[in-house]
Every structure is written in C-alpha cells, then in structure tokens.
Image (spheres, rainbow, N blue to C red):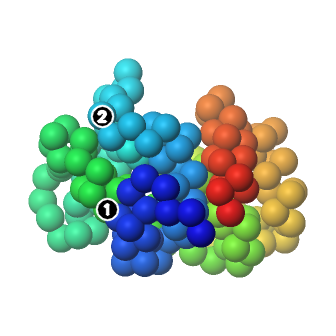
Amino acid sequence: MHQGPYGSVIKQAASTYGVDETLVKAIIQVESGFNPGAVSKSNAVGLMQLKASTAGRDAYRLKGRYGQPTTHELKDPRVNIDLGTAYLSMLQQQLAGISNPETLRYATTVAYVNGAGALLRTFSKDRVYAVAKINQMTPEQFYKHIQKNHPAAQAPRYLWKVNNAYLAMR
C-alpha cells in the first residue's frame, strides 16, 4: 500500500488505537489536504483538524493526561495524528455494537464531524434502540439515512467526501 506523507506515523497510531489506517488517511485528506499548519475558522488545528477544547481534551483524557493540547502541539503531525486517531477510537467505542464494518466506518466518519450522540439521535433517543435499528440496515441504507436525516448540514457532505477519499486510497 502506498504510504504517502506521514505513512509510518499513521500506521503506528492506527495500530495503537485499533483504527482503520485508510480511514485516518481519508480524514486527513478531507480535513487538511495533508497540511499540518492548517487552522480553520472554528479553530480546528492541524492534519486532522482537532479542536483543543473538544476532541483534543477528550483524546488527552483517554491518554491519562489532564487539560488540553496547545495549538503548537496540534500543529505537530505526530501529536495531531496520535490524538486524532485516539479520538476516532473513542468514537468507535461510543458506537460499539454496530456490527457491519462498513456501516461502522460510515458512522465513525459522521461522528468525527458532529459527534456520536447526534448521529445516534437520527435513529432514536435511546442509544441501544438506535444501534439495533442501525444493525437492521445495510451499509447503503445507513448511508442514505444519514444523507436524508442528519440535522447538521455538513454531515452528509462530509461522509460523501471522506468515503470517496477512502475508496480512492484503498
């Protein structure tokens, strides 16, 4: 497989946190176009466009650290990829129970941009029931449901963009 920029860093983080390496690459492609210095209007920073106060803080906690990463840290590709991949693994935990791997990849992608809670609420207020409903769907049905029903305007477009990048990299 073509490593591309930061290939060994991505491979290491993906292996450490049990996350699909190609998904990490696809998210980096869509989020920053592999530019480690990228900063968004909403102050998301670096390759994986992490916000220090949300994803950054959550990933820090997972690693047993207090507080949140600095902008300087988030512009460091190694730190950014490590924290972003740790955050993806946390989302996968929150979505645990989704049985189809393709559906789980779609769900993780949407959760990365808008949170696992918002995603599950498009199916039901009850988490267990939401996962059960998702498991009755094919990946295609899940994808269509998100395209039609997700309350955040950017979620369907984000899923489309990341999935296209993913398929192109496979």
User: What's under tag 2, amino acid-wise?
Assistant: Gly
Of residues 96 and 76, which is closer to you in this image? Answer: 76
Query: In this rendering, would 73 be left or right of 96?
Result: left
The reply, left or right, for residue 31 in relation to residue 135 is left
On-image quarter of the N terminus: bottom right
The residue that mark 1 highlights is 82
Q: What is the crowding at mark 1: few (fewer than 14 residues within 10 Å), some, or many (at least 20)?
A: many
Q: Is residue 152 visible in this depiction of the protein?
A: yes
Q: Is residue 2 left or right of residue 54?
A: right
Badge 2, how many Cα within 10 Å: few under 14, some, many 20+? some
Q: Quadrant of residue 99?
A: bottom right
Q: Residue at x 78, y 66 (%)?
A: 133
Residue 146: where, in percent of width, then height? 75, 46
Viewer-nearest of discs 2 and 1 = 2
In the picture of the structure, the residue carrying the numbered disc 2 is 37
120 left or right of 66? right
